[in-house]
Image: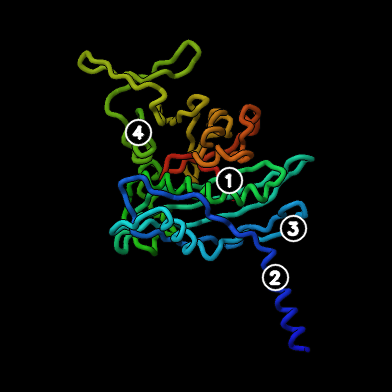
């Protein structure tokens, strides 16, 4: 009888424990439409904190811990093989840096939730790795059932990140596994713009040329409209004019000062010990409609109630500004939060 009671207690504890878990469901697909097939999908879990989050669910607001079905490596590998035929020599490697869910402010109708996301992608051939893509950002959700909405969107976030990575070819230094944890620090030391030397005058068409300090050749002169906006850069050589429209510029450097093109025009591009940054907010950097079709990261626009942090951009444009750094590995804005 005593053993029977012990078994009943253990069974009850197991059931209760199981009910405290909210398991991520990897629905949809991560089909690779490109001509770069990968043989395997591997995950290196570098999260300092492996806990995704414990949140209230359903009408009873039962606290549940959000978890992977098994392990990130097993789950993503299985997800990949559902919709892809393995290729030949190269592996797709996802380095998971951060996945954290948390709750924010609440009113009578909706509650705010945040997803802190950080990941990197590499192509692995043999025992060496080469960089594909990275993203550090915070997504904000507003919904009555915000916990359910965030968990539902975890596969959407990863799907968009992975599909973006598929479309890119490996770049940069070829590194060993032991270098992956400090890859960003290792690579940043190679960029001329980060070495503390004066910036070269001229027009830069993309982030790669800016960080490598290789401006467009020739003596370009900026043309400014009657409203004070830069419209184009023009150079004249041998009687021939070459024009670069403002919307095709990444940045320019004039009299030692760098300025970066944004949705709100050119903003000062300053530098500190952490890298190059602009002073602004999402309202300055993105058009309002960027939160609709695909969102700023191109991933959650079609899911009702899910928007990136700072979606109320019309109001934000007049709000507080902060340092927003330019990621030298992707040229994108880094909205990660510590």
Q: Earlier in the sequence, mark 1 or mark 2?
A: 2
Q: Which residue is mark 4?
A: 200
Compare marks 1 and 3 and give the one earlier in the sequence. Answer: 3
Residue sitting at the far top: 226
> 307 or 241, which is in the foreground?
307
Disc nearer the start of the sequence (4/2): 2
Q: Residue at x 47, y 63 (%)?
A: 73
In contact (CB < 8 Å): disc 4 and disc 2: no
Residue at image mark 1: 138
Return the x and y of residue 84 as percentages of the image width and height.
38, 54
Secondary-structure class at tag 4: loop
Residue drawn at x 77%, y 83% is: 5
Q: Nearer the viewer, residue 190 or 263?
A: 263
Q: Which residue is labeled 3 in the image?
A: 62
Residue 70 at least partly seen: yes
Give the mark, 1 or 4, whose residue is nearer the N terminus. 1
CA neighbours of label 2 inside 10 A, class few (<14), some (14 to 19), many (20+): few
């Amino acid at each position: 009888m005593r053993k029977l009671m012990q078994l009943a207690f253990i069974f009850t504890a197991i059931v209760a424990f199981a009910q405290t878990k909210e398991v991520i469901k990897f629905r949809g697909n991560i089909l690779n439409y490109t001509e770069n097939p990968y043989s395997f999908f591997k995950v290196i879990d570098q999260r300092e904190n492996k806990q995704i989050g414990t949140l209230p669910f359903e009408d009873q607001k039962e606290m549940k811990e959000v978890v992977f079905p098994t392990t990130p490596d097993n789950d993503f590998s299985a997800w990949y093989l559902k919709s892809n035929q393995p290729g030949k020599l190269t592996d797709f490697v996802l380095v998971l840096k951060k996945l954290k869910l948390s709750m924010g402010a609440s009113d009578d109708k909706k509650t705010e939730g945040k997803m802190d996301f950080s990941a990197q992608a590499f192509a692995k051939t043999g025992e060496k790795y080469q960089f594909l893509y990275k993203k550090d950002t915070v997504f904000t959700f507003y919904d009555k059932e915000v916990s359910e909405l965030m968990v539902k969107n975890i596969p959407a976030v990863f799907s968009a990140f992975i599909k973006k990575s598929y479309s890119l070819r490996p770049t940069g230094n070829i590194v060993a596994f032991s270098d992956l944890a400090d890859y960003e620090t290792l690579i940043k030391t190679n960029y001329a713009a980060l070495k503390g030397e004066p910036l070269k005058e001229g027009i830069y068409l993309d982030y790669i040329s800016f960080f490598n300090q290789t401006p467009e050749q020739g003596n370009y002169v900026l043309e400014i409209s009657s409203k004070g906006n830069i419209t184009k850069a023009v150079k004249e050589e041998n009687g021939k004019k070459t024009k670069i429209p403002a919307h095709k510029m990444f940045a320019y450097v004039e009299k030692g000062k760098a300025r970066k093109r944004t949705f709100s025009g050119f903003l000062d591009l300053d530098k500190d010990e952490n890298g190059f940054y602009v002073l602004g907010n999402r309202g300055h950097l993105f058009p309002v409609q960027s939160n609709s079709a695909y969102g700023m990261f191109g991933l959650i626009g079609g899911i009702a109630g899910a928007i990136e942090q700072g979606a109320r951009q019309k109001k934000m444009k007049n709000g507080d500004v902060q340092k927003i750094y330019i990621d030298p590995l992707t040229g994108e804005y880094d909205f990660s939060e510590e």
